[in-house]
Amino acid sequence: MTWTANSCFVTLAILFLWRGEEVAEACSCSPAHPQEAFCHSDVVMRGKVVGVQEVDAGNDIYGNPIKRIKYDIKQIKMFKGPSDDIDAIYTAPTSAVCGVTLEKNGKEYLITGKLKDDGTMHITLCDFIEPWDELSETQKKSLTQRYEMGCGCKITRCTSIPCMVSSPAECLWTDWLIQKKVYGGQAKHFACIKRSDDSCAWYRGSAPPKKEFMDIEDP
């Protein structure tokens, strides 16, 4: 193999590895507590898929066509978002680039996502999307008031010891550390709520907490 051919091969190999790394990192995000997902999303809704199709979404910087999956949605309830119903959701075509697969079989989902400037809703694997029937009763009730009350708090995910709060307005999320699962007891049954002294603490209960509450149940 000549030096020119060898050099070309090395260049292509480096380019391949770089592109492979880019794809591998294209969908990289840390799990979010359901409350964080609620607070950081433009839209939080309950709905089900009634249709699906692949659509064109323009071209990339190289002139290649961009494909998107369009889910036609039957909105059941809007917890956070625009006043008009959401009737379509867009996502990337594969999970390698954060595309989300939703089933068209009558299954209802809790869906969080972002709104584009044109008003369309887009979702990725980094959003909190779960079958409605798999949510706990606490999670369902928290969508109407409790999560919103904690949007001024910070939830820090603990993956190792030591793990400490950096401010009073912070809650430690220890599901992975204690239960070795991402969505354990704190994700399913607790919300991080701001108290009357502006500190934050985990709260568990069937009724929405009073704004001046000071006592909590420990996770």
Image: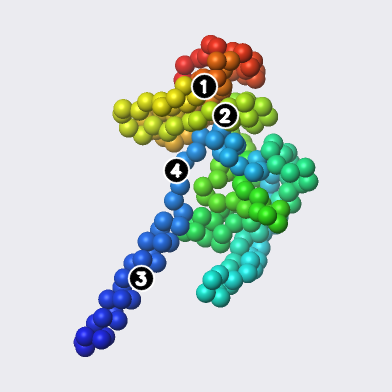
**Residue in front for this viewpoint, 78 or 172:** 172
Q: Is residue 9 left or right of residue 109?
A: left
**Image quadrant occupied by the N terminus:** bottom left
Q: Amino acid at mark 2?
A: Gly
Marks 4 and 2, the one that precedes in the sequence: 4
Splitting the image into 4 quarters, where does residue 17 fall?
Answer: bottom left
Closer to the chain start, of discs 4 and 3, is 3
Asked if the residue at tag 2 contacts the one at tag 1, i.e. Cβ–Cβ closer than 8 Å, the answer is yes
Residue 33 spot, x, y in % from top left = 51, 34
Residue 30, which numbered label? 4
Circle nearer the N terminus (2, 3) = 3
Q: Which residue is mark 1?
A: 200
**Disc 3 marks which residue?**
16
- In the picture of the structure, the residue carrying the numbered disc 2 is 152
Q: Secondary structure at mark 3?
A: helix
Look at label 4 and name its amino acid. Ser
In this view, the residue farthest toward the bottom is 2
Q: Amino acid at mark 1?
A: Cys
